[in-house]
Amino acid sequence: MDAHSLASPDLFARRLRDLCGELARGDYDNIDSLFAMTADAEAPETVRELAEAFGSMAVQIEAREFRLGEMLAELKEANRRLEDANRNITSENADLKTQVQRLVIEIDQTRKEREVAGIIETDYFKALQERAQAMRQRHSTASPHKSERT
């Protein structure tokens, strides 16, 4: 075995280690070098197999990151729609509160009118009205006599 063939496995192993370090940091720029290493006949079989395994993992991770990115975008859009819906509901609630307050006032007014009508239609109230009318008439007829006396 010559020096080149002894160094070659170490060089491949270091290169594989460096590429895996890049992948671990989320840097996929050199992933093609990792896939090229799987087909390099000069690379030791173990290094080719590891490169294949790491390449497969990198593809799966990249696909997961892509799906997660899409899901994050969907969640952000759903959140925006929920915030819009919340603003609309808050506005509608304020409008409904105002309408309820108006209805309460209308109900109170209607109840008052009904209660007043119930009172003025009683025989007792009618008798009081008649007595008040009679008192006014006596008072109005009595007033001219007073002014004549003074």
Image (cartoon, rainbow, N blue to C red):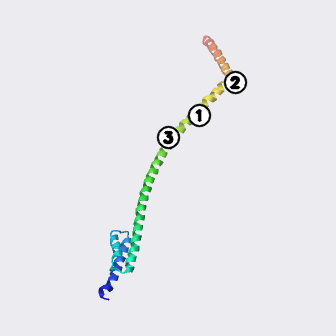
Residue closest to the eye, 88 or 115: 88
As shown in the figure, which amino acid type bears the numbered disc 2? Tyr
Kindly state the secondary structure of the residue where label 1 is placed.
Answer: helix
- Quarter occupied by the N terminus: bottom left
Q: Nearer the viewer, mark 2 or mark 1?
A: 1
- Disc 1 marks which residue? 108
Q: Are the two marked residues, 2 and 1, in contact with CB atoms closer than 8 angstroms?
A: no
Check the image and report above or below for 86 versus 105.
below
Residue 24 visible, this angle: no
Q: Which mark is residue 124?
A: 2
Horizontal and vertical percent position of residue 106 = 56, 33
Horizontally, residue 148 falls left or right of residue 13, namely right
Q: Between residues 59 and 69, which one lies in front from this camera angle?
A: 59
Instruction: Please name the residue shown 61% across and 32% down the image.
Output: 111
What's the mark number on residue 95?
A: 3
Residue 148, image quadrant? top right
Circle 2 residues within 10 Å: few <14, some 14–19, many ≥20: few
Q: Amino acid at mark 1?
A: Asp
Residue at image location 40% in from the left, 77% down from the top: 49
Q: Crowdedness of circle 1 by 10 Å Cα count: few (<14), some, many (20+)?
A: few
Residue 133, image x, y percentages: 65, 18
Which badge, 3 or 2, is on the more N-terminal residue? 3
For the point 59% across and 34% down, the residue is 108
Q: Which of marks 1 and 3 precedes in the sequence?
A: 3
In the displayed structure image, the side of residue 27 where residue 99 appears, left or right? right
Dot 2 lies on which element? helix
Image: 138 above or below 13? above
Kindly check if marks 3 and 1 are in contact, taking CB atoms under 8 A apart as contact: no
90 above or below 4?
above
Q: Quadrant of residue 140?
A: top right
Vertical position of residue 110 compared to residue 94: above or below: above
